[in-house]
Amino acid sequence: MTQERSDSILALRRSSIPFLWVGTAAIIVGGLVAAITSPLKLEHGSWASAYLVLIVGIALIFFGVTQSLLTERATRRTIAIEIGAWVLGSLAVLGGTLVSQPAIVDIGGAVLVIALIVFALAVRTRGRTRATLPLWVFRFVLLVMIISIPIGLVLSHLRH
């Protein structure tokens, strides 16, 4: 492996570290929420735990690591916007659900869509001759998330 290729792989991995830290913290918090809310039989405890683990944690790690493999264009500013919007949007969804305020959930959903748009723009394929499997998987998961957000917002309004 050439030094240039080795440096490139290291740079890609380095750009995924913030996503790994934040996502891992969310997964741990989700586990703690499950451990605390289950014995207390809190109404939204299992949902909040699953949301923290699957959306705030695993989805963020997926998007950040996959982005780092697909592009070198993600700047520190882009990464900060992506993580900040993902966390803020998720906190609004969680908080709005827990206090039964669908309007707050709507705001959170909109912020999550903004984060997904930033991810999509960072990984656009300008200059590539063909899409790779990781790019197609990235696009598929992005599409699933974009479709699931309005569904979740409608369900939030129906519940309240």
Image (cartoon, grey):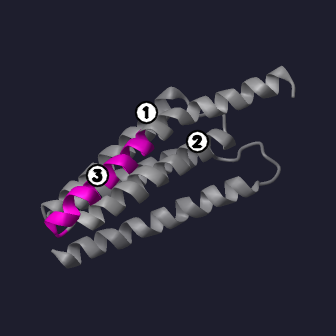
- Which-is-in-front pick, marks 3 and 2? 3
Query: Left or right of 143: which side holds 24?
Result: left
Sequence-wise, the earlier of marks 1 and 2 is 1
Q: Is residue 1 visible?
A: yes
- The residue wearing badge 2 is 122
- The residue wearing badge 1 is 80
| Circle 2 SS class | helix
Label at residue 32: 3
- In the depicted view, which residue is nearer to us: 137 or 3? 3
Q: Is residue 102 visible?
A: no
Q: What stretch of residues is rendered in magenta?
A: 22-43
Q: Is residue 73 above or below residue 146?
A: above
> Which residue is depicted at the point 28% across and 51% down?
32
> Which residue is depicted at the point 78% across and 46% down?
128
**Mark 1: few, some, or many residues within 10 Å (few <14, many ≥20)?**
some
Where's residue 66, x and y in %?
62, 47
Disc 1 residue type?
Ala
- In the depicted view, which residue is nearer to us: 30 or 63? 30
For the C terminus, give its image quadrant: bottom left
Q: Is residue 38 above or below residue 21?
A: below
Sequence-wise, the earlier of marks 1 and 3 is 3
